Amino acid sequence: MSASSASAVDQVSTSAYRIPTDAPEGDGTFAWDLTTLVLAQVQADGVVGTGWTYGSATCAGLIDEVLTPVIRGRDPMDVPGTFQGMVDALRNVGRPGVGGMALSAVDCALWDLKARLLELPLSKLLGQVHDRVPVYGSGGFTTYDEEQLTAQLKGWVADQGLTRVKIKIGESRGTREERDLSRIHEARDVIGPEVELFVDANGAYTVGQAVRMADRMRPADVRWFEEPVSSDDLDGLASVRAHTSADVAAGEYGFDLVYFGRMCAARAVDCLQVDVSRCGGITELLRVAAVAAVHGLQVSGHCAPNLHVDVLASVPNLRHLEWFHDHVRIESMLFDGARRPARGEVSPNLNAPGNGLKWRAEEAERWVIK
């Protein structure tokens, strides 16, 4: 379909699904046994674009009430214009949190719709610069026992060929340092010396703790120290960064460009984590990546792996993508065309328009809550 023949967005629909985890999951500051996926779909000329976020089912109601009146009737080719209209509509509601997640889901759906209307793979529409996106296995929850952790690590390395893996530390808000260290060394023993080992404290440590832990885990050759302290503590992140050889990363809870600009200016991290299902969708992720490039920083995609592949393939300063266990499992169950890693990488689908995914509505029905 040519751009001139596309009419207007005539339908917006939302739904929400609460999906049990396959085992209890937890990190340094939170624990859960359910994950909620909120789906947004937009339609024009009988073509449907799909996006989603992981958050409260409240996101669906916010899309219905606040964003749909802005989206319906808009030109599906003008995604940035619709994005700005949605941002304006969120002014009195609040963009961070639920507002940002709702915005992100719809923005991703609009880009998918545009690519499908133009009969283009989404990565090509966005300007693909990478054939493959490196990924790292992510899980290693603090709730796992030794057997569970070992099985997951072996599955990533031996079965899926991943060359980077990450586990959670900072258990019980940083009060179990010895168990953290024990699990770090266990992970290193399981994966061997060649695979890169990452850790994520989810902001559980104080600055002093994080610096001390960085020194104590040095023998395990940890390469990536994620959220050693709260992502909101830019001075603390910068202090930890100055005292460790591991790359310090943060940013997964960023909801707009201003947040990421401040993080870059503060020299708080070695790599920005950006979540396309939170930050404002594809439109904002591309802007964040550009600002990061100005500061000499790379970008790593946070979770929602199948939502990230196409946009990250279009980011020149790409580091990698988080292959998060819970979301990989959900997306593999609920989308035809979900990606699978090969030799530690995933590739955009160049043989189908849009994001190349098809929602399995019947399969998802058993978990629907909205």
Image (cartoon, rainbow, N blue to C red):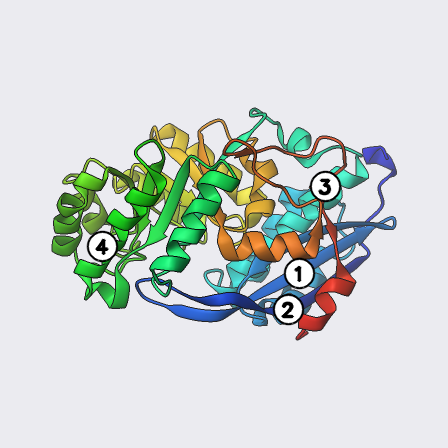
- What x and y, as percent, mark residue 331? 62, 53
Residue under numbered circle 2: 17
Q: Quadrant of the N terminus?
A: top right
Question: Could you tell me which secondary element the residue under label 3 belongs to?
Answer: loop
How far apart are the two marked residues, 3 and 1, measured between alpha carbons? 16 Å
Q: Which of marks 2 and 1 is nearer the N terminus?
A: 2
Amino acid, disc 4: Ser
- Which-is-in-front pick, marks 3 and 4? 4
Cα distance in 3D space between marks 4 and 2: 36 Å
Q: How crowded is mark 4: few (under 14 residues within 10 Å), some or many (20 or more)?
A: few
In front: label 4 or label 1 = 4
| Residue under pointer 1 | 39
Identify the mark nearer the N-term, 3 or 1: 1
Residue behind mark 3 = 356
- Name, please, the residue furthest toward the front: 147
User: How far separated are the C-alphas under marks 4 and 1?
Assistant: 39 Å
Between residues 203 and 12, which one lies in front from this camera angle?
A: 203
Q: Nearer the viewer, residue 199 or 315?
A: 199
Q: Residue at x 56, y 31 (%)?
A: 313
Query: Circle 4 sits on which residue?
Result: 182
Q: Which residue is drawn at 74% across and 63% down?
A: 363
Secondary structure at badge 4 equals helix
